[in-house]
Amino acid sequence: MPPIAHLIQQRAAAALAALVIDAVFGDPPNYLHPVGVMGRWLRWGERLAPAAPGARLAWGAVWLAGGWVMFGGVAALAPRHWLAQGALASLLLAYRGLDRAVAAVETALATGDLVEARRLLGWHLVSRQTNDLSTAEVAGAAIESLAENLSDSVIAPVSALLIGGLPAMLIYRFTNTADAMWGYRTERFEYLGKVAARSDDLFNWLPARLTALLIALAAQIVNRRGRQALIGAIRDARRTASPNAGWPMAAMAGALDTVLTKREHYTLGTGTRMADAALIREARRIGRMVMFLVTGFLLGLSVMRLVKQRSTL
């Protein structure tokens, strides 16, 4: 077997193990979570950053690169066995936690508790103000978060693992965390987080579009709206400020025959169904189907590796 093919199949086995471990155990406690360590590194960098815009821009780039070297280097020292790699990689995935957070909002809306649904949405899923959101806006925001995070928390890190191994996965996750913490156009972060934001855009370019395609395939299986999901993604993805987030969100809007709106920012989709608890449930079904498709792909690669190994015996 060519070395590169063997390497990819070994990484696929690790990614498959990571998905299974995440599905069974979910996220570790915050004090043990790698993202928590990344957050502390970034907060330290922010405290030490200079005040002048040009110096702040350079500092943000250097601090980001330092994190790449540090976290990527630590990952390179990890055991090479696929199961050990999968156990470590599972710490960088978040599908179970994502689905549970979205399900909590769904349950609150289903029981008519809009205040609790707003609280859960703001606590777990979005950074926007949620205190005055309507039922449809809360449901829509939960669906948007599910779609976007399918890319950021599953497809992108798994893709990074397949392409560059565990170091690339750590580098991606660190960059994504830096963008989440620093990637704001405010006086405080405009220059400090600019390189992190642009790097995150670059790293997510392909995964976001791949996620939109997977949502379309999943929708075709779940509710026969794969074509509408794909059309919606192509038509509406560029309506968001982010070059990437609009792709999975617009695909999900098309898949659900609904409109997803963030006030004064964007409107995705042209559907007729109003976002509510039932629509969140359907979005979660599509999300689970996406996970099934990804798991099946990784399983296929892993089985091919085992078959080829046995054929050489």
Image: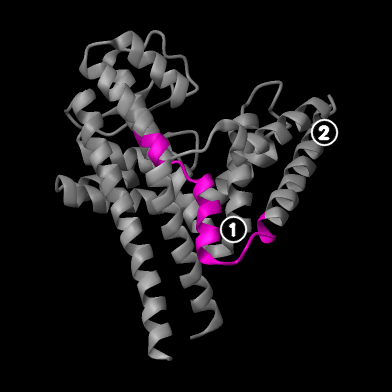
Horizontal side of 72 relative to 292 (left or right) equals: right
Camera-side residue of 122 and 30: 30
**Neighbours of disc 2 within 10 Å: few (<14), some (14-19), many (20+):** few
Residue 242 at x, y percent in the picture:
50, 37
Examine the rendered structure and indicate whether residue 168 appears above or below residue 12.
Answer: above
- Kind of element beneath mark 2: helix
Say which residue label 2 marks. Answer: 54
Using the rendered view, name the quadrant where residue 257 is placed. top left
Say which residue label 1 marks. Answer: 166
The three-letter code of the residue at mark 2 reads: Gly
Horizontal side of 13 relative to 34 (left or right) equals: left
The answer, for residue 263, to whether it is visible in the render is no
Residue at 39%, 19% (x, y): give it.
Answer: 120
The three-letter code of the residue at mark 1 reads: Leu
Boundaries of the magenta span: 75-99
Residue at 51%, 65% (x, y): give it.
Answer: 82
Whether residue 232 appears in magenta in the rendering, the answer is no
Whichever of labels 1 and 2 marks the residue nearer the N terminus, that label is 2
Horizontal side of 204 relative to 113 (left or right) equals: right
The answer, for residue 208, to whether it is visible in the render is yes
Magenta: main secondary structure: helix
Residue at 44%, 34% (x, y): give it.
Answer: 240
